[in-house]
Amino acid sequence: MNPPKVSDRDYIDVLIATPKVYSATEAARVQPEEPAAPAHDAFTRLPHRLKPDPAALWCEAAEQVERCGGVLVVDDSTLGKPYAKRIDWVQWHGSGKRHAVVEGINLLTLLWTEGGRHVPVDYRLYDKAGDDLTKNDHFHALLQAAHERGFSPECVVFDSWYGSLEVETDAGGTLVHLKGYGPIRLFKIVAPDGDSEWWVSNDLRMSPLTRVRFAGDAWIIEYYHRGIKPFCRIEHTQVRAARAQRNPIGLCLRAFLRLEWHCYRAGVSWFEAKTAIVRPAVPAYLNNPLYTLSATA
């Protein structure tokens, strides 16, 4: 059997380089001109061929994090698939971005940050119709895996959806007993529009000012969601089968890991990093414009 012509690294490089739309056909078109250049079907087969493995992300992220310190953030996001027809994993989920229930794939991400970086270290896909695990089960699995990998963060922050607590408190915090765990400090923040936000900490002495500092770290994951969707095209996988859906999502996360590491070292934004890739093509076009009008008298 001939070896595959396309590797996971090839797929990731195209994700990083492509300015807008990703497709197997376009991936084949932009390959360097050489006799053995892969055709589009080589890129099409890759998501079906790879074994889905979230651990591949951790293998690449491990050297970028400080396990003793920083903050771990757990959050989910719905990868919108508004035009999906018979695509595995696509179900109805709540979307915070759209403030509605939408069709898509629900992605849970565990992110590490020290305030300046956004490093995804693990992820899960929530298939509420196809498996026996709840979103909270996946949440606990992410934290358990982080513990086994030696993480000892300053704090773990997550959305109030995972708490399911019913107790009276305020912004100053209240000591309560969490069944199966013990004493915790609970904060309730009410936004100007009336929405409530819950915060829980096992630091019983946590002050409101400290909570505000960690709140800034929690917001980083929203910033991360806004980056990985347009810059790594994580919502634009064009496959149907479950296995083939899982792999491009994992590859997009690994592409983001590389993009984020470059931006951190270079001190540039995601937008600037992507623009720098295609910028050399503009002078080349200006030297030889292809789209012109016929000369008129």
Image (cartoon, rainbow, N blue to C red):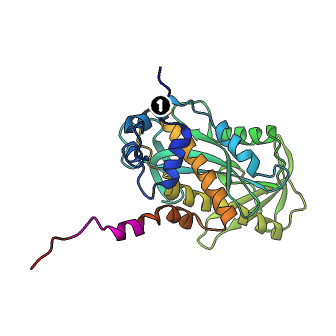
Q: Is residue 168 above or below residue 55?
A: below
Residues rendered magenta in the picture: 282-292
x then y, percent, for residue 230: 49, 58
What residue is shown with label 1? 48
**Viewer-proximal residue among 106 and 224:** 224
**Viewer-proximal residue among 71 and 276:** 276
Q: Is residue 287 magenta?
A: yes
Q: In which quarter of the image is the C terminus?
A: bottom left
Tag 1: amino acid: His
Q: In the rendered image, which quarter is residue 133 located in?
A: top right
x then y, percent, for residue 278: 46, 62
Q: Does the magenta stretch include residue 49?
A: no
Residue at horizontal 42 percent and vertical 36 percent from the top: 36
Q: Which residue lies furthest to the bottom in this view?
A: 297
Q: Is residue 113 left or right of residue 92?
A: right
Residue at horizontal 35 percent and vertical 70 percent from the top: 287
Q: Is residue 177 above or below residue 142?
A: below
Residue at horizontal 61 percent and vertical 69 percent from the top: 194
**Viewer-proximal residue among 250 and 131:** 250
Q: Is residue 167 left or right of residue 283?
A: right
